[in-house]
Amino acid sequence: MRYRLQHYDHAPVTFGRTLALSRDAEGRWYVDSDTPARKSAQQLWDQGEVSVVRGRHSLVLGTGRSSEELHMYADLADRAVPAVSGAWRSDWARHVVVQVPRTLEGMAGLLGSPASQYRGIAAVTTGEVGGPARAPADRIIVNPDAYAILGSLGKQVVLTHETTHVATRAHTTPATPLWLSEGYADWIGYLGTGRTPAQAAPELARAVAAGRTPDALPTDKDFGFSGDATKLAQAYEGGWLACRLIADRWGEARLGEFYRAVGDHRTRDGSVESAMAKVLGTTPEQFTEQWREYLQDRLG
């Protein structure tokens, strides 16, 4: 099946369904059931009646959620979009689609994955990295259980982080390491919040204080949702501080240029090395050492 959100999707969303059919004695066919196909994700309407709230820069779809709550998400998204546009100096749609299911299990159903992978994860963004301009809009999918326990600042940071993923999607490719894509999203998410490195990176701060400063930037495997929670937190914090270091030493505009240069590389091999040489005038080895010193200086 295919569907399209008017003014948001530049191409239809395509997904698989399994239909059970039967025929009566007079030869008429009937559809007995309509469910997601094997290995296909649910759609939001599979989980109940869908409510819709439209913001200035957002479309919020929810099941089992009050109008007041959905308006709260729209307000957060409407603040996130201008914040991202102010930092990311590349063209993008400048609006977002947010889906709010009833439960964590509902979130997992929309992603076609086990709920255990997303426990404690407040939101994720779906979309094809390096996708074409004419593609379905990314969906920001909220985990209502984890999102509900965040404070007002945390809620805004998360929505701004996920909105950054939407904005940078066309320049985020298989050549982009997760420390850069996640770190850049956190960098924009925390802009203007007044959060210090020690406040925003408590797990790394504890590690540095104990003399366990990481030897290398986080790997993609460190960002696995089903792994160790402390290691996952340190991966996000390390990526954020790497991007913060670039913004501090080379400037915010150069950070965006570096992000695009990495994504423009054809393969992962050599993408960071080439972009660091071209945009920052350094090497991964030199940058890693600067990053370690930066951690010790800001978190020690």
Image: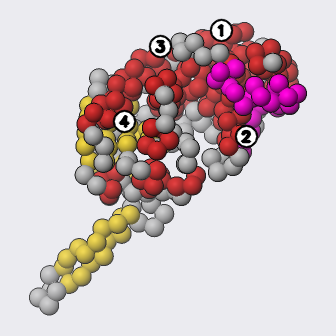
Q: Give the quarter of the image for residue 276.
A: top right
The single residue placed furthest to the bottom in the displayed view is 25
Query: Alpha-carbon distance for marks 1 and 4?
Result: 31 Å
Density class for disc 1 (Cα within 10 Å; few <14, some 14-19, many ≥20) is few
For the C terminus, the image quarter is: top right
Query: Alpha-carbon distance for marks 3 and 2?
Result: 31 Å
The single residue placed furthest to the right in the displayed view is 211
The tag on residue 251 is 1
The x, y position of residue 222, in whole percent, is: 72, 42
Mark 1 residue element: loop
The x, y position of residue 200, in whole percent, is: 64, 23
Query: Alpha-carbon distance for marks 1 and 2?
Result: 29 Å
From the image, tell me which residue sits under label 4.
97
3 or 4: tag closer to the N-terminus = 3
Give the magenta range: 198-222
Closest to the observer, 280 or 223: 223
In the rendered view, does 143 fall on the left or right side of 223?
left
The x, y position of residue 118, in whole percent, is: 55, 48
Amino acid at pointer 2: Lys
Mark 3 residue element: helix
Q: Is residue 8 visible?
A: no
Task: Please say whether residue 176 is one of the residues in the magenta stretch.
Answer: no
Amino acid at pointer 3: Gly
The x, y position of residue 287, in whole percent, is: 81, 20
